[in-house]
Amino acid sequence: MALIVQKYGGSSLESAERIRAVAERIVATKKAGHDVVVVCSAMGDTTDELLDLAAEVNPTPPAREMDMLLTAGERISNSLVAMAVASFGVDVRSFTGSQAGVITTERYGNARIIEVTPGRVQEAVDEGKVAIVAGFQGVNRDTRDITTLGRGGSDTTAVALAAAMNADECEIYSDVDGVYTADPRIVSDARKLDKLCFEEMLELAASGSKILVLRSVEYARAFNVPMRVRSSYSNDTGTLVAGALEDIPMEEAVLSGVATDKSEAKITVLGIPDTPGEAAKIFRTLADAEINIDTVLQNISTREEKKTDITFTLPVADRPRAMTLLTKLQQDEGWTDVTHNDEIGKVSLVGAGMKSHPGVTADFAEALRDAGVNIEMINTSEIRITAVIRESELDNACRAIHDRFDLGGDEPAVVYAGTGR
Amino acid sequence: MALIVQKYGGSSLESAERIRAVAERIVATKKAGHDVVVVCSAMGDTTDELLDLAAEVNPTPPAREMDMLLTAGERISNSLVAMAVASFGVDVRSFTGSQAGVITTERYGNARIIEVTPGRVQEAVDEGKVAIVAGFQGVNRDTRDITTLGRGGSDTTAVALAAAMNADECEIYSDVDGVYTADPRIVSDARKLDKLCFEEMLELAASGSKILVLRSVEYARAFNVPMRVRSSYSNDTGTLVAGALEDIPMEEAVLSGVATDKSEAKITVLGIPDTPGEAAKIFRTLADAEINIDTVLQNISTREEKKTDITFTLPVADRPRAMTLLTKLQQDEGWTDVTHNDEIGKVSLVGAGMKSHPGVTADFAEALRDAGVNIEMINTSEIRITAVIRESELDNACRAIHDRFDLGGDEPAVVYAGTGR
């Protein structure tokens, strides 16, 4: 008998019919002899509908009130799932984030979990009940006000509860049945992976894979909670994300997959005086504005002596703000120009096997060359290689790398309705 | 400077536009120098939509989960009203029933308020903020689970908060601008009343007036909280409900109004052996089934000696259950027959002035006789006369009594859209 935490996303709960299907799965897990704690997102479009209502009432609503509003969505799905489970004759209790002891920082809209004190949830489980917990929400440690956890908040709730309750596994259900070697919509022979270590999943999530939110994987890694990515439409066992990179025997380390990301833009600052501290001014300015930059390239300008160019990537949403800040600095600092390009893409190859295969970078670059793709920037970690290329060449590049490293399966990938929200 | 509690019903909050209108009123009250605490019902049809969803998922949902579900409705309206108030530059905080310290019994779906400990609400008010509290909801004293207060729960929340915070007045906003001498849809010259004592309002509410829920008036009377019935569509000062019957000087005591009620049925048990305890058996059977009976009439049957007939009224919804129970008893007890009639109505005249006008009952009966209305039963209290008549004659009877006691005004009554939900 194990303690299983199951998290269901909004698309898995979008109708009464889907809620009953989810309840069947919960009941089956319980009847198989396991203890079950369930974390629910808000139903389908509920959150968007609430956001629309808020915008009609006040275009710039107070963040505290926005959190009070949005948490109603999970309260609704939560109690409906509990009712559906009860309809199968199984004893069940639902809990809000606050009741489940999800204690957070005070940052409304994007609070961090400080600790989880799931006494009431544990008590329900000890009494043989299924416990249903509203995801995405918690309670401010200081003021006892309601907070929300931001993007991927329900996944994080599930992992944090699993950690606090010492669960055997945290299952994340959506409309995709696992982690694939590449996006099956781009690569037709993409293969579902059975297992990944935490570091590989972190690199994939940071490189554009949408299947798990980076933050929830970081939490799972920190508390060593095995996660399993599963589909609420199938009985496939999905993909297990567990274990540390250093525990993978060298002979079992492989290349896991290719991730693509269209969400970044690049900015180039041209003609920077090549004196100490000039580059730091750029990065300090952006850091103060809470803009995260990713891949950075610095090279000696060929046009003028003693001057350099710096190119870096950043989220496309932050690009206009960054341009405004840097254009302001340009005159004072004597830079030649500041330019940008939103039409870039990143393609990354990730895998523990990279450590033991020194030729991977060369093969990676050759695969792109053979496909006629020009590499603008390149960036590597211990188990990842990323190339910044033109956005229009991204799919082509993804397929070329997937083929070159022979990551495909024998059968075409299964794509469910709605895959790749 | 006063402390005003304002309660807004669902129809006053049915759209973003209406919510902004409500916020304007709240802000105006605050800017007039008062402290303001607001209690909100769920928006328009939200509760019905949630009930429909629940029915799809589980036709007999657990009551605890139903309360968790339904309270999302007030959480939504509550935070939206707070956002709307904030848009006028006024500092505001919203609170759930639990956060506002509304402590209740454990009876899900129909909990009673045990006490209100509004520390956080008071703190917000002391800081100069408008406080918005979700109506209809509380928290179970023992289990800390979410409860709902049943019909009229938001009015009761408002009155209980007003009592706990020692407010100067509790304003109840809906789409009707006060308490009228009769339903303006029936009596065209019905007049709005400026003031009523608690006992008069209780008698009107118990006699079919829908404007205030009996329970909230009982609470207001017990804690001596002045209530004011107002419309969210006008600036009329509405009707003040305050003060005790015994404090009204005899010369100021008048007749207040006529109420009608179509929600009752009557049952007649014929040929009951006229021995002690026979009538008690009927009432005990119904009481054990939690069926409340109202007007009772017992008379010696003319057909047989030593036998009596008993007629009583009860809510029409309980009539089928009552008939089943009594028909079962009929044979054992040797009653001649049990009959029922759902097509009855009650017309009541209410007013403190009745105490000092001994001829009222005679005038009341004559008015009905002159209108050709037959009285089936009659029942009186210190300040009320009620006649049970045929439902089809109810409007006619209401107009006749209203005319006879000269309750009308010089101008036709104003009827707003939606009056008389």
Image: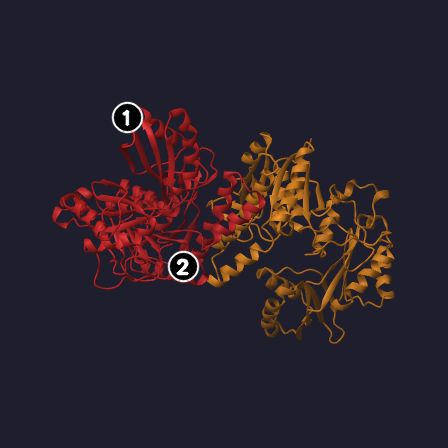
Chain colours: A orange, B red
The image position of residue B120, as x and y in percent, is: 39, 45
Whether B43 is drawn above or below A96: the answer is below
Where's the C terminus of chain B, which quadrant? bottom left
How busy is the neighbourhood of tag 2: few (under 14 within 10 Å), some, or many (20 plus)?
A: many
Q: Chain of mark 1?
A: B
Q: Which residue is mark 1?
A: B306
Instruction: Identify which amino acid the numbered label 1 is placed on.
Output: Lys
Of the image marks 2 and 1, the number of the one nearer the N terminus: 2
Q: Chain of mark 2?
A: B
The residue at the point 40 percent across, 45 percent down is B151
Farthest residue toward the front? B303
How busy is the neighbourhood of tag 1: few (under 14 within 10 Å), some, or many (20 plus)?
A: few
User: Which quarter of the picture shows residue B414?
Assistant: bottom left
Label 2: which secondary element: helix
The image position of residue B370, as x and y in percent, is: 21, 52
Q: Which residue is mark 2?
A: B85
